Image (cartoon, coloured by chain):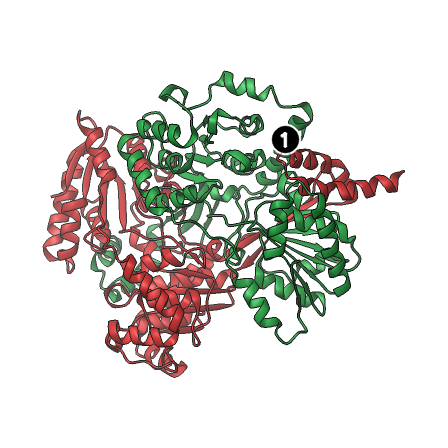
Chain colours: A red, B green
């Protein structure tokens, strides 16, 4: 059974604070190992990557077989059943259509002083996507990472995906093909991150690395941050559902379980204004857990980190949700639009009872790479913006420099930065000569 | 004398690569010390902050005097000379006007399936700005950090600014007042970062921390990243000037020196298509260095890291500049607009000879917090976007769920995520019941 909390209880605040502060993930400290792997790849390039792949993935590669060949990719893609191919194509199309609306616009204008100002967006030149092997090798994640890069106009897009024992997921390769990926390297772990950040003879370095991974991958991303850009370091998945009693308890139960089944550290929270509805949902979860394929994962997640919170009204539900700043937020209430106006921090909102969160994982269009661990307070999900950068533009005319230059000189002198002031003064003097 | 390179020389590529790879900064490893300070502040709150301020800043504070009072701020602001006040006000107005154009727009639309999609932007609730003490206590940086937060709609905006020995920079307090800062705490170092990230009895925690600082501050920001958002970890400043012979060598010389005077690790590079113009600029730099107030800083920076590169033509200049991905780029050429079209990576571009980079430091309008150390390849300068975050929105109707739900179910099953599929299936079954 999960925790049951009631906002009317005298000890609620303490219990809710404990829920917020609970450490759900115990990352092993692999930083030293990772530092060694990165140094090795920097020093020995392909040789190091190949040796580490033999060691960790039991796979013998050569520089020529580090990447899948076009023929291999075609052969694997041909194995994908027609219904899965159609579903993946629909997902890719919808994700692309959504993300194309995110492309930012360049701006230019002339201000009152006559200065021309603005900014311009350009894509990152090369991006590398990490795709985990084994259980967490999700083709949907390939689409969610690669399509925003493709839409942004990234020139070179590569994937590193380990294939332990040589086992390949054909859907991953098909997803890569559908989203414009140039090359798929069959390597993983910290060695793949190091190869993408620093380059080897075979793998040209990239400028930005995104994608989920295990503790080794996360530690390597942290270490190469600065040398290249990275996306967030994702924590275990979370869902918060705000539901009134006008819902089928079973629907809400499977929604909660759809996060719980990801990971024993995942967290599913229900907030409701009806205590008996909350109990009915908890009961429905237990029923579903009896037969759920992943009950060995979803069960512990629900028991250890799940919570059912009863509140006085939906306004209070929104307040509590904002303190959680959940990755996924379902609003299964009569007026989801109205309630959503009270939400200030959430990665993604799913409006109304016909929008299960799983729609967002696959096919809705929005990205499923979202801020976890309360970081929706200050960060956003993955988007086209992660693969572009802004260059600001300024152009002074002699007249605008005359108008605003003296103030710049004054501030430069106040900060004891003489050369800053002189760079303005030299030009102003010329203008004054011209005027005399 | 700086390095002189010529792109026609046979060893140019090796020399240019060495210039790109040169390590200019030797950060002391203070990570262990910083870890200890953060742990201390988390454990003992105000007491730890006060003790560390006594130790490092020789300043005795109490919880009541951690922040400047409104009276103290008024008294300090009254000391600012009229011309400096006017200059700072003009700068604040221009920076605000520029950044107001960055406010992103919410979007909502209904797609072909009938699904309602979109996103919504909300401000970070609370932001903390770090302002270094001593020499690097720049009022312009207060404006550049605080105004984007103010424009974004951040509710609570605080500053931590150490005042070693109790010495205050009145312009910093005036800049804070002009940009809507709520509270200025007179604390600094890793203890200030820890206090802002984790909170103390006196200082409520914030969600995002920005602003430059020394090695202790940088290490502390790295450590609290994830608990709160941070801006970039800034490296030493850089300028790259592309100039043809139609420029006054002295203007270009002071522009180069305006970065060199920041820091012995700063880097100033001139790329020109005229070797003799390059020599004339280098000569002009030497002349200016004879009398420059900060020659003890600018001289070593120019000699150790400065470079004058002669190229065949301006297209080659743009190519080399893109490999550098400079923080600041001046295009002092006949057709700066045309050349700027060839620039793919730069933090800020200054177009034409009437736009010295110092205009951008103070008064142009664009932000002066910009990506250093080649990170303009994948990141942007500070902006309103750093203080807002996007929540994606999706709302299915029964009809749209019928249209796209089966594909989501198919992909969920292919990824062995049964509960994901069930959350869609439960709803589809209801719709099918309704239809039968």
Please tell me whether mark 1 sits on a helix, a strand or a loop. Answer: helix
Identify the residue position indicated by label 1 in the image. B88
Q: Quadrant of residue B52?
A: top left
Image height check: is B227 above or below A34?
above
Number of other residues with Cα within 10 Å of mark 1, as a class: few under 14, some 14 to 19, many 20 or more: many
The answer to whether A182 is drawn above or below residue B433 in the figure is below
**Looking at the image, which is closer to me, B256 or B97?**
B256
- Give x and y (percent) for residue B108: 46, 46
Which residue is most to the right?
Answer: A436
- Residue at the far top: name it: B71
- At 32% from the left and 51% from the top, the residue drawn is B398
Most foreground residue, B239 or B282: B282
Q: Position of residue B27 (x, y in %)?
A: 44, 50
Can the viewer see residue A164 in this picture? yes
User: Where B192 falls versus A229 (above or below)?
Assistant: above
Q: Residue at x 32, y 80 (%)?
A: A61
Q: Is residue A208 left or right of residue A193?
A: right
* The C terminus of chain B: image quadrant: bottom left
The quarter holding residue A12 reads top left
Q: How many marks?
A: 1
């Amino acid at each position: 059974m999960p925790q049951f909390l009631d906002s009317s209880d005298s000890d609620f605040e303490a219990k809710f604070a404990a829920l917020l502060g609970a450490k759900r993930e115990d990352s092993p400290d692999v930083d030293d190992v990772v530092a060694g792997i990165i140094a090795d790849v920097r020093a020995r390039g392909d040789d190091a990557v190949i040796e580490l792949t033999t060691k960790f993935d039991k796979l013998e590669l050569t520089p020529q077989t580090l990447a899948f060949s076009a023929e291999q990719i075609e052969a694997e893609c041909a194995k994908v059943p027609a219904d899965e191919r159609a579903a993946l194509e629909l997902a890719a199309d919808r994700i692309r259509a959504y993300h194309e609306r995110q492309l930012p616009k360049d701006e230019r204008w002339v201000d009152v002083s006559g200065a021309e100002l603005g900014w311009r967006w350009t894509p990152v030149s090369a991006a590398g996507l990490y795709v985990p092997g084994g259980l967490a090798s999700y083709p949907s994640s390939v689409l969610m990472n690669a399509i925003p890069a493709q839409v942004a106009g990234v020139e070179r897009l590569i994937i590193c995906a380990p294939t332990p024992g040589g086992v390949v997921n054909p859907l991953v390769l098909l997803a890569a093909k559908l989203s414009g990926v140039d090359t798929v390297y069959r390597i993983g772990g910290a060695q793949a991150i190091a190869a993408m950040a620093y380059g080897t003879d075979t793998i040209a370095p990239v400028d930005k690395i995104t994608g989920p991974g295990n503790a080794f991958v996360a530690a390597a991303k942290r270490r190469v941050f600065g040398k290249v850009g990275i996306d967030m370091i994702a924590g275990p998945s979370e869902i918060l559902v705000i539901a009134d009693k006008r819902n089928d308890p079973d629907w809400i139960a499977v929604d909660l379980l759809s996060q719980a089944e990801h990971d024993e550290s995942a967290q599913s929270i229900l907030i409701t204004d009806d205590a008996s509805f909350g109990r009915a949902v908890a009961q429905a979860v237990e029923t579903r857990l009896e037969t759920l394929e992943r009950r060995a994962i979803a069960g512990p997640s629900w028991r250890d980190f799940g919570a059912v919170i009863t509140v006085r009204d939906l306004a209070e539900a929104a307040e509590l949700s904002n303190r959680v700043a959940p990755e996924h937020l379902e609003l299964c209430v009569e007026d989801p639009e109205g309630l959503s106006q009270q939400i200030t921090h959430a990665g993604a909102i799913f409006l109304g009872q016909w929008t299960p969160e799983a729609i967002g994982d696959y096919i809705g269009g929005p990205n499923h790479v979202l801020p976890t661990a309360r970081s929706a307070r200050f960060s956003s999900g993955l988007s086209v913006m992660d693969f572009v950068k802004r260059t600001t533009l300024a152009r002074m005319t002699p007249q605008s420099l005359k108008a605003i230059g003296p103030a710049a000189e004054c501030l430069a002198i106040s900060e004891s930065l003489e050369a800053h002031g002189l760079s303005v003064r030299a030009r102003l003097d010329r203008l004054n000569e011209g005027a005399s």
